Amino acid sequence: MARIYLREGKIEAAKNLYLEALSRSPRENKAKYALIQIYLASKQIPQMEAMAKDILASQDNDPQELVNIGSIFVAKGYLDLALDFFTKAVSIDYTYSGTYIEMGKFFYDQHRLDDAIHIWQMGLKYTSDTETFKSLIVQAQRH
């Protein structure tokens, strides 16, 4: 229902449903992921930061969701939080290629080419998406 509210622009109603879900099940990370996005969009930064810390402390995270949120943080300029989310994703599943791709892009965009290449080399080592990583590494080496 909360997703429908979001599509209809009823942000406050969606937020209340997610908060209600959390009150019934405090370990419901999907609600936490959605709330971070709502808090960011509505510029409720203290609430967003508190939710981010709660997610990072949790043991029940989905690496893909962590990377998605990390990428949102990059786009919004919350670089320290982005890196924390990427790092947490790697610690949960070091074989998920999306983490290495996005984390490498993060470093690349910060002009930290050696760090980007290192992360992409790790991705090349631990995942099966070799062509993507080889291409990213070559691109960074040319830069």
Image (spheres, rainbow, N blue to C red):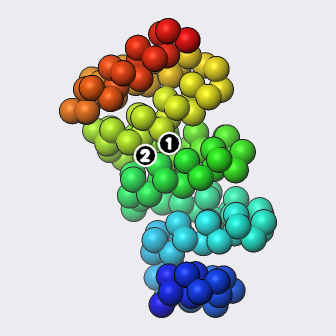
- Location of the C terminus by quadrant is top right
* Image location (x, y in percent) of residue 105: 52, 32
Check the image and report above or below for 45 versus 118: below
Residue in the image at 58% along x and 62% along y: 54
- Crowd band around label 2 with a 10 angstrom C-alpha radius: few (<14), some (14–19), many (20+): many
Residue 2 in view (yes/no)? no
Q: Total marks drawn?
A: 2
* Image location (x, y in percent) of residue 129: 25, 33
Check the image and report above or below for 136 versus 89: above
Residue in the image at 61% along x and 66% along y: 37
- Secondary element under disc 2, as helix, strand or loop, is helix
Amino acid bearing label 1: Phe
Check the image and report above or below for 77 versus 132: below
Q: Residue 95 lies in what quarter of the image?
A: top left
- Secondary element under disc 1, as helix, strand or loop, is helix
Residue in the image at 63% along x and 44% along y: 74
The residue beneath circle 2 is 89
Residue 39 in view (yes/no)? yes
Amino acid bearing label 2: Ala
Q: Residue 59 lies in what quarter of the image?
A: bottom left
Is residue 80 toward the left or the right of residue 117 in the image?
A: right
User: Mark 1 near mark 2, Cβ–Cβ under 8 Å?
Assistant: yes
The residue beneath circle 1 is 86
Residue in the image at 38% along x and 58% along y: 62
Q: In the displayed orientation, state which residue is furthest to the left.
A: 128
